[in-house]
Amino acid sequence: MLNILKKLIAYQRLLLNSNPPIDINSQNPLNVLFYVFAFAMLVFINISLFFGDTASSDTFIPFTFPIITIWMLNRILHGDHRLFETVPVSRKYTALNIFLLPIVMIFILFILVYISAAVLISIIIGFVSLTNPQGSSQLPPDSALQQIVDTTNGNLLMLCVLIIIIFVGTTIALIKRKKLRFLSFVVFTALGYGLLLLLKINMPIYPATGKIEFIESFSIMPQSNAILIIVAIATIIISIISVYLGSKHYIGKSASMNHS
């Protein structure tokens, strides 16, 4: 078991090392324009769906991190630095590691972000304690405590969104044809954004802010349990189908190359 784990870690490191360096001196202005446009769209989607008075890492991280990892995976699979292809392993093993890589990258990003946040919060609390020792021990008023709601349903929904982006995005990244891959990303993004926007439009107003706050409003939504069950079942089905189609495409591509 330990030996298998070591091999997985070694291959994951090889995949990460296969990420080609970003050419900041690229002579093609279309590449720069594309990255600017993609970043602007990511910011727009985040703001239009999740930005509000209670906006936090509960919505930003589950939506942004998988997109970053899929972008990196796409560069690894279709770049000119594919070191992982030089190792004599089966295509099934490579496909397994490809689907595992985004999960590993998100786990690493989570750790880095929360460690950085913990250090920053500790510094701020320490500074406040030194400058205002009496005020640092004050508790929020009762009215503020009463506004706290159970956001379990909202957090679980965002977890499902994260999983769907990972598995569907990985499957799309495995598509060889560039135009078909790009079109698939566009359709997936438009469909996902449309469904989330439709859900947000039908959410109730969060009383504490008088606005629709994605996590809180969904959590107090009367239909949230039913919607969450449907989304959870869809997430499992989509993940299984994505792994099947992505692995079949990747392994089948190898077989067709060998016959040719």
Image (tube, helix red, strand yellow):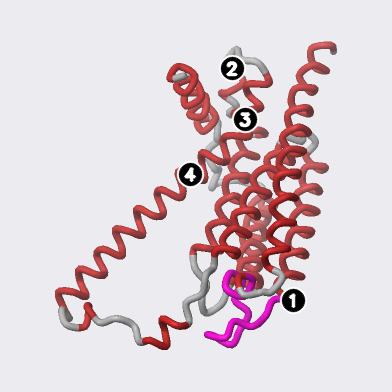
Q: Which residue is mark 3?
A: 80
Q: Residues within 10 Å of mark 4 (few under 14, many from 20)?
A: few
Q: Principal SS element in the magenta part? A: loop
Residue position for label 2: 86
The CA span between labels 2 and 1 is 51 Å
Q: Secondary structure at mark 3?
A: loop
Residue type marked 3: Asp
| Range drawn in magenta | 203-218
Q: Amino acid at mark 2?
A: Thr
Choose between 15 and 207: the one closer to the eye: 207
Q: Which of marks 1 and 2 precedes in the sequence?
A: 2
Circles 2 and 1: CB distance less than 8 Å?
A: no
Q: Label 4 is placed on what type of residue?
A: Phe
Task: From the viewer's perspective, tell me whether residue 10 is left or right of residue 224.
Answer: left
Q: CA distance from mark 1 to mark 3?
A: 46 Å
Image coordinates of residue 44 in percent, x first then y, are: 65, 68
Considering the numbered disc 4 on the image, is that residue within a helix, a strand or a loop? helix
Contact? badges 4 and 2 (CB < 8 Å): no
Residue occupying the point 81% across, 43% down: 179
